[in-house]
Image (spheres, grey):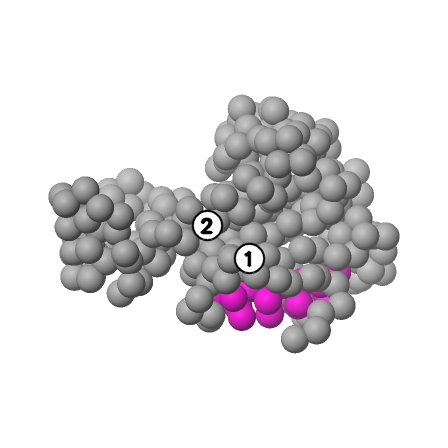
Amino acid sequence: MAYEFIEVRTEAGKVGVITLNRPKQLNALSNGLMDELGQALKAFDADEAIGCMILTGSEKAFAAGADIGAMASYTFADVYKGDYITRNWETIRSIRKPVIAAVSGFALGGGCELAMMCDFIIAADNAKFGQPEIKLGIIPGAGGTQRLPRAVGKAKAMDMALTGRMMDATEAERAGLVSRVVPFAKLMEETLGAALQICEYSQVAVLAAKESVNRSFESGLADGVMFERRMFHALFATEDQKEGMDAFVNKRKAQFKHR
């Protein structure tokens, strides 16, 4: 389908790529954009041929934040009755296949929060992350006070949320917010390489791995380990487990069928 605020394409028939496309607004996350993003993510998630997704922006900005121009006039009744953020931003949390954020330039406020909703972040060396909402008389509202401390620890999260300062790509990698930092010219090549590598594996195992890692943030250690153990056991009922282990024993490349 045609989109107004995003661009969508596939790579190698296996990877869905979504590019945020409001360049004049530095990809500010309007309701319209977030509606379209949710639709595109769900379409790729339902496509049997797609094994992984990439979410990216422009060289200057992944997303410089939520649409402050629209938000400025909202009242409590507007945001509460309209279920602001929850209604459409949370769609990404229901996506079962991996989503990688390829971040260049500014990822601030809602942009930082959107990147953190992805499964991991690959950052260009010009990337800058921040939660500057305190400067506007509000606080992060899309998980910034919850996901950020889980990624970088309480001290750095408090520093960013209370002072509004930005974290560059080097610090973000050191703190654990991003998985790797690459030159901007290599950002999409590196991210696509990671996505294609994921697509080589059993899709059933990939889904189980994503679900298990996410469970670690939502349960205690004992419950999380038990969930992991049961998922591990369950994969022995798949054809891909038999194929993967037979290929290893016989020193050949596995041909997974995703079942």
CA–CA distance between discs 2 and 1?
Answer: 9 Å
Secondary structure mostly seen in the magenta stretch: helix
Looking at the rendered image, the quarter that the C terminus falls into is bottom left
Most foreground residue, 169 or 52? 52
The reply to whether dot 2 and dot 1 touch (C-beta < 8 Å) is: yes
Could you say whether the residue bearing mark 2 is in a helix, strand or loop?
helix
Identified by mark 1, the residue type is: Glu
Q: Position of residue 250 (x, y in %)?
A: 14, 45
Structural crowding at the residue carrying mark 2, measured as other residues with C-alpha within 10 Å and reported as few (<14), some (14–19) or many (≥20): some
Identify whether 212 is placed above or below 30.
above
Looking at the rendered image, the quarter that the N terminus falls into is bottom right
* Mark drawn on residue 11: 1
Q: Position of residue 55 (x, y in %)?
A: 60, 52
Q: For the magenta stretch, what is the residue range?
A: 30-45
Q: Name the residue at 72% across, 38% down.
A: 105
Most foreground residue, 165 or 73? 165
Identified by mark 2, the residue type is: Leu
Q: Name the residue at 31% across, 56% down.
A: 202
Identify whether 202 is placed above or below 2.
above
**39 in the magenta segment:** yes
Q: Earlier in the sequence, mark 2 or mark 1?
A: 1
**116 in the magenta segment:** no
Q: Is residue 164 left or right of residue 258?
A: right
Identify whether 181 is placed above or below 111.
above
Most foreground residue, 171 or 72? 171
Could you say whether the residue bearing mark 1 is in a helix, strand or loop?
strand
Which residue has dot 2 on it? 196
